[in-house]
Image: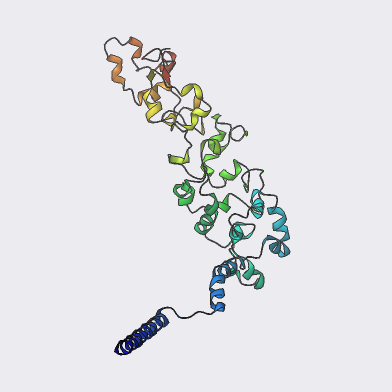
Amino acid sequence: MRHIRRSSVLNLFLLALCIGLAGATASAGGKDSPVRSPQDKQDSNATPQAKEGDKTSAYAGAETCKTCHEDLYNAWEKTPHWKTTLDTRGGPSHQGCEGCHGAGLAHTQNPGDATLIFDFKKASAKAINDRCMTCHASGKEQMDFGRSEHSHSNVSCTDCHSPHHATTDQFLLVKAQPQLCYTCHLSQKPQFEMPFHHRVDEGLVQCTDCHNPHGTIAPKQVRTSAAQDAACFKCHADKRGPFVFEHEPVKVEGCASCHTPHGSPNAHLLKVSNVNILCLSCHTASFANAPGAPSFHNQAAQFQACTLCHTQIHGSNFDHFFFK
């Protein structure tokens, strides 16, 4: 009988203990993890989609822009930029008119507020360049634009390019070369009218054949080859070398140490009319008295051009003195 009573008391004690632990657990759970209804869970799961919807709902689409700006749209759809309307990888922020002008839904709802759309005519050069570089910064021609002279001089992309009213078949230029470049570079225009000049005005050479308007690591935005050779060697390949006997100024100072690249009154675009004077700018007259030097090296009369004998002045594979 006593054994039965003890078992009953023990069972009652264990039952009370279990009820107490269950109550404590429920209380702690109520503080840290409130009970959520099925509707709450559904709302939480819908949040990412709602946020994505908020982003896309700000865009009106290019066809909506056409409603008011039909003339601009008709010109724009003939340009390479129009193909962005078919590229959905970047989303609406990279498509059509709004890829450049920004989200346009608010602008369509309140056209009178100019702050609701990006206006290239009213924006600063830096703002325009930053917007264009969003897509074009990775291009091999534009990757150095940040260090270019044009960027430092506050020249914007739309000073040279027109996405809507381009006059050239390539590069959306507002004018064809060289007239476009002459708009700012007036001092270079008469150089191409010299008796000896690169035939830029004749259309055989373009400014961009030698210069990259978007910037390079070389001075004057001059193009260089993969080996960092001068742009001149693209046409004057016979002067490239390498030679067994190099003429040092060609490699160290470049072609411009002796030649004026745009135009010159002197043959071969030389900086001076007398070849001897050009040579003497580096080779002082003291060499005339050097042992073994021929008598006609005396430059007092300057009656013979150095290149009459030193014919391979750009470099030679056979003679240290560039005789052949």
Q: In this view, does 228 lie to the left or right of 100?
A: left
Tell me: 185 left or right of 12: right
Residue 202 image offset from top left, x and y in percent: 62, 33
Name the spot of residue 154 as percent of width and height, x first. 49, 54
Left or right of residue 73, residue 148 in this image:
left
- As drawn, 128 above or below 55: above
Residue 51, picture quadrant: bottom right
Residue 205 versus residue 287: which sits nearer the camera?
205
- Nearer-the-camera pick, 36 or 122: 36
- Is residue 237 depicted above or below 12 in this figure? above
314 horizontally vs 94: left or right: left
Which quarter of the image is occupied by the C terminus? top left
Pick the quarter of the image with the N terminus.
Answer: bottom left
Q: Is residue 86 at least partly visible in the picture?
A: yes
Residue closest to the eye, 79 or 219:
79
- When the figure is inspected, residue 39 is found, relative to residue 191, above or below; the finding is below
**Residue at image point 60% right, 41% down:** 177
Name the residue at 46% across, 31% down.
230
Q: In which quarter of the image is residue 169?
A: top right
Percent across and percent down for residue 165 are 67, 52
Which residue is pictured at 48% across the width and 80% down the height?
35
User: Residue 13: image x %, image y %?
Assistant: 33, 87
Colouring scheme, one of rainbow, by chain, secondary structure, one colour = rainbow
Residue furthest to the front in view is: 1
